[in-house]
Amino acid sequence: MFELDNKVAIVTGSTRGIGKSIATQLASAGAKVIISGRKQETCDLVSNELNNKGFFTKPIACHVGDKDQINDLINQTIKEFGCIDILVSNAATNPSFGPISKLEDKAFDKIMDVNVKASIWLSNLVAKHMVKKKKGSIIILSSITAVLGTDNIGAYGISKAAEAALVRNLAVELGPEGIRVNGIAPGLIKTDFSRALWENPSNLKRQENLTPLRRIGTPDDIAGIAHFLACEASSFITGQLIIADGGETIAWT
């Protein structure tokens, strides 16, 4: 039920952090995983690392803010493997830190292009191939900022709320074709991407105290959820946003 033998998975932003952990988890379950990030040399390094552990991965560079590169990513995957069974849209950006009142248009456009448009482009292109098998799993990485207000990463939260809405709508549209679409909304995860939120010891302690489990998350905490959503164990689950935040959003502090 949890095996992914010979399934083909694309994981964007999989050269580090949450994406790399998800790619590793899917590969360990038997999937053939496309390692994708902006730089080919970085993709090659991660792919070689995982292949040396006995996994099956292929590196394909892709800047998800570029629709042509997304098309190339999908086309190369189909040419190599003939199908796509799993998509994990994980790549994201957040070039703005501060109140929305000071948000620059250029930064907001970049956030929406990479975080929202890319998920739409990827999902639409992958779905065209999944419908041929009447089966597939699309997983979109959102964030608890989709359901919580913040005074410093509001624009990022807007994009993640849009992705949560995208999950629900795609689930309705693609369900009749046998394609499931779900989202994961992580809380604070210890990655380079979120370093500004946990690197300072006092900030880390404050964050830990907001969380009933009294810790921040790790990339592996999210990888297990992605594995579940990718496999047959979740075959009757679609349109859901799974919050993985150690209980932060349900705690009254």
Image (cartoon, rainbow, N blue to C red):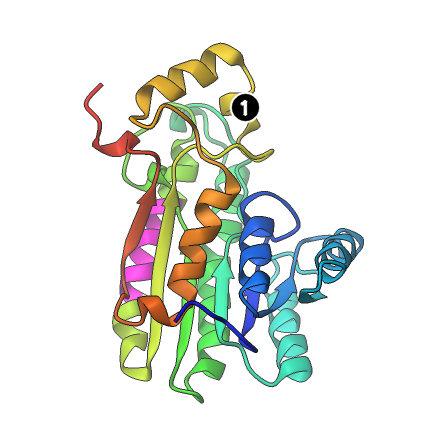
Q: Is residue 247 left or right of residue 206?
A: left
What range of the chain is rendered magenta? 160-169
Of 252 and 175, nearer the camera is: 252
Q: In the rendered image, which quarter contains the C terminus?
A: top left
Residue sitting farthest toward the top = 202
Of 14 and 6, nearer the camera is: 6
Q: Position of residue 23 (x, y in %)?
A: 58, 57
* Residue visible at 35% across and 36% down in the picture: 245
* Residue visible at 60% across and 56% down in the picture: 24
Q: Looking at the image, is 108 positioned above or below residue 213? A: below
Q: In the rendered image, which quarter contains the N terminus?
A: bottom left
- Residue designated by label 1: 196
* Residue visible at 39% across and 36% down in the picture: 187
Q: Looking at the image, is 60 positioned above or below residue 185? A: below
Q: Looking at the image, is 69 positioned above or below residue 243? A: below
Q: Is residue 128 left or right of residue 75?
A: left
Q: Is residue 152 magenta?
A: no
